[in-house]
Image: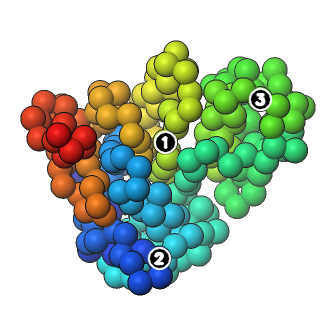
Amino acid sequence: MADPILSISGLVAGYGGVDVLRGLDMQVSPGEIVAVLGSNGVGKTTLNKTLSGVLRPRAGVIRFDGADIQAASPAAIVEAGLIHVPEGRKIFPDMSVLENLELGSYRRAKARRARNLERVFATFPRLLERTNQHAGTLSGGEQQMLAIGRGLMGEPRLLILDEPSLGLSPLLVEEMFGLVKTLNAEGLAILLVEQNVMQSLDLAHRAYVLENGAFVLSGTGAELAANPDLEKTYLGM
């Protein structure tokens, strides 16, 4: 089996005097979709910030592509190919669609910007139609496409998708999960951080359920979908 592209062990992180993540162990192998599932406030955002270098861990090791990155800067982590599409999209509303996409290659793959633009526009034809439109005037679904497209511009080795279905209509949610499946079929490893449990488990090769800063369940997507403890753990029932 291939070595993991991402592995974390004993990860502890938090804010002030409070530990939010309490000793997490996790792996993502090349070509996998791994889901991290949990409701609001369980530590998903803290995990993403820590993996992206925005928040320094208090303990533990994060290894990406064989190198320790727990002390690396966010810019260095992006340059290594670990790219985070944040919750809420975080696009630049007063910049054009094209300008937002070009920023995605600022730290990585700048020399292949034109080729990667073609790929993004092939994946998201609606963005091509709105190239010069201000990003803030796009619909919610289009803004999510733009956020993911911006991430793809950096040629990620691992793409973290933070709540990509949040705020989308049921039809667009189906479209978004279909896109995740397509990107993975092209070989991209994806860490899918979601509240949408069953659709995430349908896609995921493996999954972890996060509760109060610790992983309380893990297994293949199919195993967790069939696990009677999932409802109790996730919904507190």
Residue 1: % across, % down: 21, 50
Q: Amino acid at mark 1?
A: Glu
Residue 128: % across, % down: 78, 24
Q: Residues within 10 Å of mark 1 (few under 14, many from 20)?
A: many
**What is the spatial separation of the Cα atoms under label 3 and label 2, in whole angstroms?**
34 Å
Using the image, tell me which numbered label, if any, was put on residue 163.
1
157 relative to 233 in the view: left or right: right
Q: How many marks?
A: 3
Circles 2 and 1: CB atoms closer than 8 Å: no
User: Mark 2 sits on what residue?
Assistant: 15
Circles 3 and 2: CB atoms closer than 8 Å: no
User: Mark 3 sits on what residue?
Assistant: 138
Q: Amino acid at mark 2?
A: Tyr
- Residue beneath the point at 23% across and 57% down: 215
Which quadrant of the view contains residue 125? top right
Q: Amino acid at mark 3?
A: Leu
Whether residue 20 is visible, yes or no, is yes
Using the image, tell me which numbered label, if any, was put on residue 212.
none
Of the two numbered discs 3 and 2 on the same chain, state the one appearing first in sequence. 2
Q: Is residue 122 above or below residue 188?
A: above
